[in-house]
Image: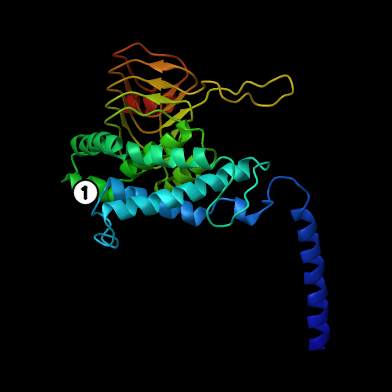
Amino acid sequence: MADDKRIRLSGALDDIAGALQESYTDGVGVNPDNDESFPRRDEVIEVTEKLLELIFPGFDRASCGTLSTEALLREVYDRLVDQICRVMRSSDRSIVCDCKSGCRCKDKDHCSAAALALLRELPRLREIIKKDVAAGYAGDPAATSFDEVVLSYPGLKAITVQRLAHVLYEHKIPLLPRMMTEFVHAQTGIDIHPGAKLGEGIFIDHGTGVVIGETAILGDNIRIYQGVTLGAGNFPKDACGMLIKGRKRHPTIGNNVTIYSGASVLGDVTIGDNSVIGGNVWLTESLPAGTKITAPVPENRLRFADSK
């Protein structure tokens, strides 16, 4: 009896395996043609973490002192080039690589240039991120030191990784920047598209549920609280009913703006400098500089207040 069950199970598994293998060759997008021409999620995460080590040296005690800055840069460069080449090949199946280790695909020069461009930006990004740290310390009365902001504030980590990913996004590297920001999104609950343009001194307090879309533009010294959405208001379609991509569809936020928890600013609107957007505001129109806007109080709350 037991042997019969094993035979039936083996036959069922063979049938399932055959059906899966057939689905793998259907050419419909959810299966890579070549395992060597596909990015590695764990490698992308590791290189992202090593970039954070270069931004915040000494804060990761597990790796502190094990590599010189030059050696760490070389390791990051090699890994970046490999993963960039992989995403370039996976996004263009016409690119053929004839070497498993040390890609010799036709876009190798572009991959190397993009990786080097990111590393060259690290000193400049560090100066900007110092302002983000200072903004977190100045903007939160609970913060006791810059070290606390670096080690424990999820908003800073999300912003830092987005700034790194944005460099690759600007160099037209597909997929990899999004993998980097989605890694930190999973860790922090903060979703900042790598295409968004962030000014200096950005502070995201608490942060869970914050969404900042691809074409959003943020000025300097902006404070954002949890649950804020800087999103698209509508999605125009082409004659075939497909969403039109690449258009500016997210807000532009001026300098010195505060956006409180739960607010949604949607569409290609402009929020002027020094404005304050209150909690739970739903905003689809532009605001002039210096505007303060709050959500209306629901009628049932007004009745409750009157009854007292």
Can residue 217 be spotted in the picture?
yes
Q: Quadrant of residue 59?
A: bottom left
Vertical relation: 250 (above or below) 133: above
Which secondary structure lies at badge 1? Answer: helix
In the orientation shown, which residue stands out farthest toward the top? 288
In the orientation shown, which residue stands out farthest toward the left? 144
Vertical relation: 73 (above or below) 307: below
**In the figure, is residue 88 to the left or right of 68?**
right
Q: Amino acid at mark 1?
A: Glu
Vertical relation: 34 (above or below) 235: below
Going 26% across and 48% down the picture, which residue do you hit? 56
**In the figure, is residue 29 to the left or right of 286?**
right
Residue 58: image location, x then y, percent:
23, 54
**In the figure, is residue 231 to the left or right of 150?**
right
Going 63% across and 52% down the picture, which residue do you hit? 98
Going 38% across and 13% down the picture, which residue do you hit? 287
Residue 103: image location, x then y, percent:
55, 50
In this rendered view, identify the residue nearer to me: 306 or 16: 16
Q: Quadrant of residue 107?
A: top right
| Residue at the disc numbered 1 | 148
In this rendered view, identify the residue nearer to me: 179 or 8: 179
In this rendered view, identify the residue nearer to me: 12 or 119: 119
In the picture, the quarter occupied by the C terminus is: top left
Residue 233: image location, x then y, percent:
53, 23
In the picture, the quarter occupied by the N terminus is: bottom right
Determine crowd level at label 1: few under 14, some 14-19, many 20+ residues with C-alpha closer than 10 A: some
Residue 236: image location, x then y, percent:
62, 20
